[in-house]
Amino acid sequence: MNKIKRSGLYDKGTMWVILLACLSIAISMLLTGSLSYNITKKAVIEKLKTKDLFFIVQSAAGRIDGRMARAKETSLIMARDPFLNEWVSKGESDLETKKLALEKLNRIATEYDYSNTFLASVNSHTYWTEGDVVGKLSETNPQDQWFFETIQSRTPISVNIDYNKERDNTFVFVNALMGDLEKPLGVTGVGLDLNDISKEFTSYKFGEIGTVWLVDRFGKIHLAANLEDRGRQLRDLLPSDICAMVLSSDTQSVDQQQIIEYTSSDGELIDLVHQTLQSTDWQLVLQVPRKETIGFLTSIMTNTIITALLALLLITFVFYLVSTRIANPLKRAIRLSEELERKVNERTQELKEQNIKIMDSIDYAKKLQETIIASDQEMLDAFKNSFVLWQPKDIVGGDFYWLRKMNNKVILAVADCTGHGVPGALMTMAVAPILNHIVQEGYHSSPGEIIKELNLRIKSAMQKEGTRITDDGLDIGICLIEGDTLKFAGAKIDLYQKKQEGVLRIQGDRHSIGYLKSDPNQTFKNTILEITKDDYFYITTDGFIDQNGGPKNHSFGRKRFISLIEESSNLNSQEQRNFFNQSLINFCQEEPQRDDITVLGFQV
Amino acid sequence: MDNLFLEATKATPLINFDADKRIIFIKGQSYPENAFKFYDPVFNWIDTYLAANPSEIRIDVRLSYVNTSSSKCIMMLLENFEKAFERGVNIQLKWYCDMENESEVECAEEFKEDVTFPFEIIPELEKDH
């Protein structure tokens, strides 16, 4: 269960990582993109307004102005020409002069790139052109109004646009007064073909949709890049307020460009720039839809978005690849370790159960071992005061102490069988009954003899021929107390007698019993002691003395043991037990118990 | 013959037997649960070594604690050396002790009592041999 959930969780983790990565990349791209877009757009619009439109309009206006200026100059020169003046003042009658005059008109037209030249006389109301006489000007003809107005105007030079019926074309005429401004002789000048100028207009168009118009003071469009617009009114093509703004520019703002931004009736944002020409009071109007200007940005944006999406896709793919490369082995490793963990838990559980069984059986074995140990009651019955410190190393052990009270005698035995734990305990269970029998059969006056007999019987009970595998035996110390006498014999176990004057050590013989090499003829010496009142006796197996600990990890030692006996003079039995126990605990600290511990103290 | 090298553990000593370099070295503490099991390869090696009849044998021992079953095994080893000594092999054993450790010294002395070949008890401080 856990395994499945974990791998699912991990997959989700991968997905989250990828998602997060994509999201952050997408957001940053979006941010960068939109920022760049907006900055660029603003900059482009700014440039458009402050530079591009200006330059275009300026350039266009400049060219037109240039053309006009040139035309005005030529017209003025013609008006001031003394030869023409003389011809007109003399009534245009002289044929010779007329020929020359017409030649002049012709030359100017052809050589100076004007569509036509003209001369109109005030006196005769004749209208001459570079060809010949064209006609007479009549006051009633509306088409000839220009003449009469020009005469009246008293301005040396003026411009008007006129549709010339004869030539079936619209021309820009530059009229210059001849002679005295108050009383002019006539009007002369040049005409510009609007078509020529209009060809140039198309080159000024801004893109496909922008428009260029040349309008007069009243809003009539005389020239346009889009030929259909010619002749229309500006107010038809622009919103009225914008149109008003364009046409209201007063003469003081000549040569000043105005930029206007408005929304057309279709909802499009349009930038408009207009400029009054220097040479006339006409306006040059250039207009371009905003989207024309920033159209390129849209394409950039689209491309960028596509690129970003592709990049995102690629990154997602790469992330996925990488994470599976890492995740898959990782996942497998995790699964493997989970599987192992499960197995380990299983085994541990099995071992736990086995261990419990074993410990249970040892716990029961302890109860069995306790049957051979002298009970508290027996100790109380045998001695005035006594204490026992009996601590097998592993629940059961190879040490035991045994007591028999008979008639007026007390026989106490303290034994240390080979080994500890279960093997040691089995030995004790074998030795104790043999000891019982020996004493029962009558060996109850000499501890030395008991030990000798025990040696023989153990050897015969336990010996197999010559194998090294189990060669076991025991150390033992036996006290026989009768009245005021204590007889002691020992096989590698000593007795300590604490008298008032000090501690006396009675050593046992230096031979263990029961082993292969234990001599069957070995005798054990009896030591007879007089017991004085208040004497306290101590027997210990080697467990206590050999316990290691302390700073140098040495054994507790006999010397220290004897000093414990000396220091316990004023303590009662229970206190003595605690004293010995605590002293050992303090000594060994962290060190584990090395061997079975048995310390007996008694007072007769 | 092959060397016998056993790393020391908490309850068993370091065994370093090298026939070519003529090293017989035991150091540490000896209180395994099953002493015979531990000393079996030791016995075998010594037996083989003695069977090859070396002219002289030098043994270095440093055992700070020997439990009852282990001391039986040590005793057996010493008996084998004793037999070789009686055959004429030149045997010398040095047993290093921390003289402040009562039991260690007594243990060495007890072993010394049972052999006749040269057995020296040498004071050694608590540092590596």
Image (cartoon, coloured by chain):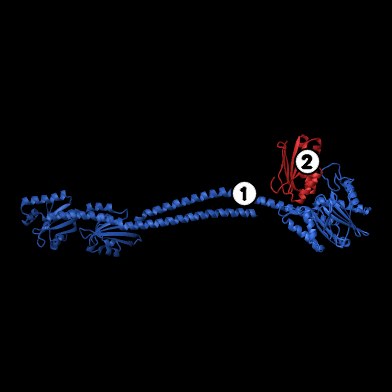
Q: CA distance from mark 2 to mark 1?
A: 62 Å
In the rendered image, the vertical position of residue B23 relative to residue A286, given as above or below: above
Check the residue under mark 1 and report the chain it is in.
A
Check the residue under mark 2 and report the chain it is in.
B
Residue A295's quadrant in the figure?
bottom left
Image-based side of B82 in relation to A199, left or right: right
Do the CB atoms of the residues marked 2 and 1 lie less than 8 Å apart? Answer: no
- Give the quarter of the figure containing the N terminus of chain B: top right
Any part of residue A291 in sight = no
Instruction: Tell me the element at label 2.
Output: loop
Observer-nearest residue: A355 or A44?
A: A355
| Chain coloured blue in this rendering | A
Q: Residues within 10 Å of mark 2 (few under 14, many from 20)?
A: some
Q: Using the image, tell me which numbered label, if any, was put on residue A46.
A: none
**Would you name the residue on which mark 1 appears?**
A333
**Would you name the residue on which mark 2 appears?**
B118
Q: Residue furthest front?
A: A501
Q: Position of residue A399 (x, y in %)?
A: 82, 53
Image-based side of A57 in relation to A8, left or right: left
